[in-house]
Image: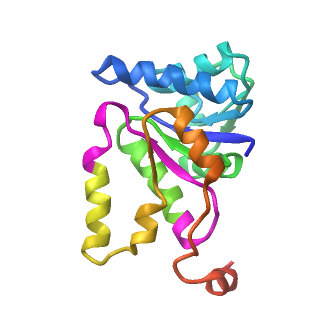
Amino acid sequence: MKSICVYCGSSPGTDPRFMAAAIACGTAIAEAGLTLVYGGGKVGLMGAVADAALAAGGKVIGVMPQDLVNQEIAHRGLTELRVVNSMHERKWTMAELGDAFLSLPGGPGTFEEFFEQWTWALLGFHAKPCAFVNVAGYYDLLRQTVQQMADKGFIAQQYVDMLIYADSTDAAIAAFRAYVPPPPKWGVAAVEARY
């Protein structure tokens, strides 16, 4: 594992523990010798993660569509800022650059991007781990909702269990290093036949 892709809020949230966790996240990734891949913003938790990783001597790659760069929310002090044409290209680029996916607290964009990677993982399109840093219980209700998906027959339990819930980024990194992916939903042969 060489890099971690982090999804998180472009706002700071209302609980100071969210910002503290973002700073700890960037620091932990850098201190582990890993590259931070994220959405390229200078605002909210996103900016805090990047600033902390840079301050700890880490490498940070941001990925942002030109439209958002034009709105002047891009972080200009990164190791590398990749400017892309669309949100779809942004998500694809981040997915390609990241060896693992980590979600801090955030809004709908955070959820959407993370869930896409989880979906791709359970389909076998990649074998990269996905984790939540569950700051102040932020993901408790989501965890219940995801479990309900299995309880109601919409997903196998192994795909619920593949999601990592950690109390810190350090714990998530340790879980990433020990991760063994489940078999893909439709089997390796079916996935290879489609791609």
Residue pictured at 36% horizontal, 44% vertical: 108
Residue pictured at 53% horizontal, 37% vertical: 171
Q: Residue furthest top?
A: 55
Residue 17 relative to residue 97: left or right: left
Place residue 41 in its image quadrant: top right
- In this rendering, the count of numbered labels is 0
Residue 47 relative to residue 61: left or right: left
Q: Residue 54's spot in the image, x, y percent?
A: 67, 18
* Residue 59 against residue 159 in the figure, above or below: above
Q: Which of these two is toward me, 60 or 68?
A: 60
Q: Which of these two is toward me, 77 or 122?
A: 122
Boundaries of the magenta span: 121-141
Residue 52 relative to residue 113: left or right: right
- Colouring method of the image: rainbow
Q: Is residue 134 magenta?
A: yes
Q: Residue 11's spot in the image, x, y percent?
A: 38, 25
* Residue 53 against residue 168 in the figure, above or below: above
Question: Where is the C terminus found, in terms of image quarters?
Answer: bottom right
Residue 80 relative to residue 26: left or right: right
Q: Residue 138's spot in the image, x, y percent?
A: 30, 37
Residue pictured at 57% horizontal, 47% vertical: 175
Q: Residue 75's spot in the image, x, y percent?
A: 60, 21
The answer to whether any part of residue 116 appears in the image is: yes
Q: Which of these two is toward me, 175 or 147?
A: 175
The answer to whether any part of residue 72 appears in the image is: no
Place residue 90 in its image quadrant: top right
Q: Is residue 124 magenta?
A: yes
Residue pictured at 29% horizontal, 78% vertical: 153
Q: Which of these two is toward me, 105 or 95?
A: 105
* Residue 18 against residue 118 in the figure, above or below: above
